[in-house]
Image: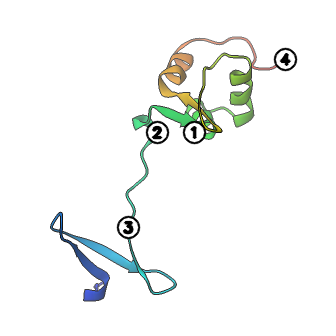
Amino acid sequence: MRLGASQMQLNSWKGEWLIMELSPRSQPYAYKKPPIRAEEKLLLSRREAAQVLSISQRALDYLVATQRLPTRRIGKRVLIPVADLRRYARADHPEPLAG
């Protein structure tokens, strides 16, 4: 696919070319940076933490409610430290989550 001159723009302060696409309104926008991977984050959302532990979000909420996993709050967001997730994952937990 060839790009026209209107689809490329020089980023003058870095001296790099950015590839621009036309939005539905014919306004150019630049590609966004890729999202930060979960392994690189310090805190994870409840959904991300549940995915990392391979459990449901409801099971994760139970772990948080019973204080088996510590949380941090930033505004209304409930975040779980990655270090605590790793610590929990390394330990054995023979008891069922709910019962």
Residue 4 in sight here? no
Can you identify the residue that label 2 sits on? 38
Distance between mark 2 and mark 1 Cα atoms: 8 Å
Which element carries disc 1, helix, strand or loop?
helix
Distance between mark 3 and mark 2 Cα atoms: 21 Å
Q: Nearer the viewer, residue 88 or 10?
A: 10
- The residue positioned 57% from the left and 39% from the top of the image is 48
Can you identify the residue that label 1 sits on? 48
Which element carries disc 3, helix, strand or loop?
loop
Can you identify the residue that label 4 sits on? 99
Nearest to the eye among marks 4 and 1: give it: 1
Nearest to the eye among marks 3 and 2: give it: 3
Residue 84, percent from left and from top: 52, 20
Q: Is residue 57 left or right of residue 3?
A: right
- The residue positioned 55% from the left and 20% from the top of the image is 89
Residue 15 quadrant: bottom left
- The residue positioned 51% from the left and 16% from the top of the image is 87
Sort mark 1 into few (<14), some (14-19) or many (20+) by Cα contacts within 10 Å: some
Which element carries disc 2, helix, strand or loop?
helix
Nearest to the eye among marks 1 and 3: give it: 3
Amino acid type, mark 4: Gly
Q: Give the vertical position of 85 relative to 25 (above or below).
A: above
Distance between mark 4 and mark 3 Cα atoms: 48 Å
Sort mark 3 into few (<14), some (14-19) or many (20+) by Cα contacts within 10 Å: few
Can you identify the residue that label 3 sits on? 31
Residue 80, percent from left and from top: 57, 29
